[in-house]
Amino acid sequence: MMSIVFKIFNVGFRQVLRDGMLLLLIPAPFLMGAVLRYMLPFADKILQQRLDFSLSPWYAVSDAMVLTLTPVMMAMICAFVILDERDEGIGIYYNITPANGYAYLIARIALPMIWGFISSILVVSLFAFTVKDPLIIVISSLIGTLQGVVVGMFLVTVAGNKVEGLALAKLSNIFVMGFIIPWITQSPVRYIFGILPSFWIGEILSNNGIHVFTMLTYGLAGAISCLFLITALTKKFLSRILH
C-alpha cells in the first residue's frame, strides 16, 4: 500500500510544482516568519520614537499567528490539489483501486500535513519572539496541524471548484483567527470560542510561565476541538472526493 501512497503523492507533488501559486505556499511560512521577525522590531523602534508606543507586548501574537497559519498554508495546498483532481474525476478512479481510496487520503492529506507539522516547528524555532519552550512549540504545532486538516477538509467539502476554493480560503482566515481572543479579553466568556482550535494556541502562548499541566490541558482541549470538527466533516468530505 505504501508504494501506492508514494506514487499518488508524487503525482500531486508534480502538480504543485507546475502551479506557481501552490508552489509559493511551500516557502511562504518561512518568508512570513522572517518578515515578522525582522520587521516588527524595526516598526517597534519607530513607533516608540514617534508615538511612544511599543509593539513588544504583542510579539507573542505574532508567534501565535505563525503557529496557526503555517500548517494552514500546507492544508490549502492539499485542498487545491484535491479540488483540481475532483474536477477531473480522478477521485473516483482512486476509489476503485485496491486501496479503496485510503491511499489517496494518506497521500493527499496525511503526508503533506506531516510536513506542515515539521515546518511549523522549524519556522517557530527560527523566527519566534517569545516561544522557546520545546513542549509549547510541539503542542501548539500539533493543534495547528490538526486545525490545518479541518481547514483543508472544509475547503474540499464546501467548494464546488478551485475558484470557489480560493474565495473560501480567504473566508477561512476568520476561522483561524481565534488565537487573538486571549489577548483581547480574559473574561470567562472567552471560552465560548473554544470550538476554534486556534483559540487554544492563543491560550497557551498568552500565559507567561504557563504550568505544564495547564499547557497539556489546553493542548488536549485544542485536539478535541479539532477532532470534533474533523468528525463532523468526514462523511461529507469523503463523499465529495471519492464518489
Image (spheres, rainbow, N blue to C red):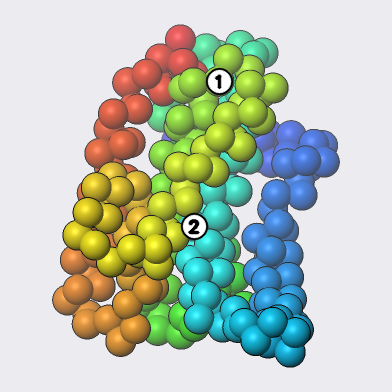
Kind of residue at disc 1: Ala
Label 2, secondary structure: give it: helix
In depth, the one of 55 and 135 nearer the eye is: 55
Q: Residues within 10 Å of mark 1 (few under 14, many from 20)?
A: many
User: How many angstroms separate mark 1 from mark 2 (CA)?
Assistant: 22 Å
Kind of residue at disc 2: Thr
Residue 176 image offset from top left, x and y in percent:
47, 48
In the image, which disc is placed on residue 159?
A: 1
Residue depicted at x 66% and y 30%: 166
Residue depicted at x 28% and y 66%: 186
Residue 140 image offset from top left, x and y in percent:
39, 65
Residue depicted at x 40% and y 67%: 183
Q: Is residue 186 above or below residue 106?
A: below
- Disc on the earlier residue, 1 or 2: 2
Residue 111 in sight from this viewpoint: no
Residue labelled with disc 2: 68
Judge left or right: residue 48 versus residue 3: right
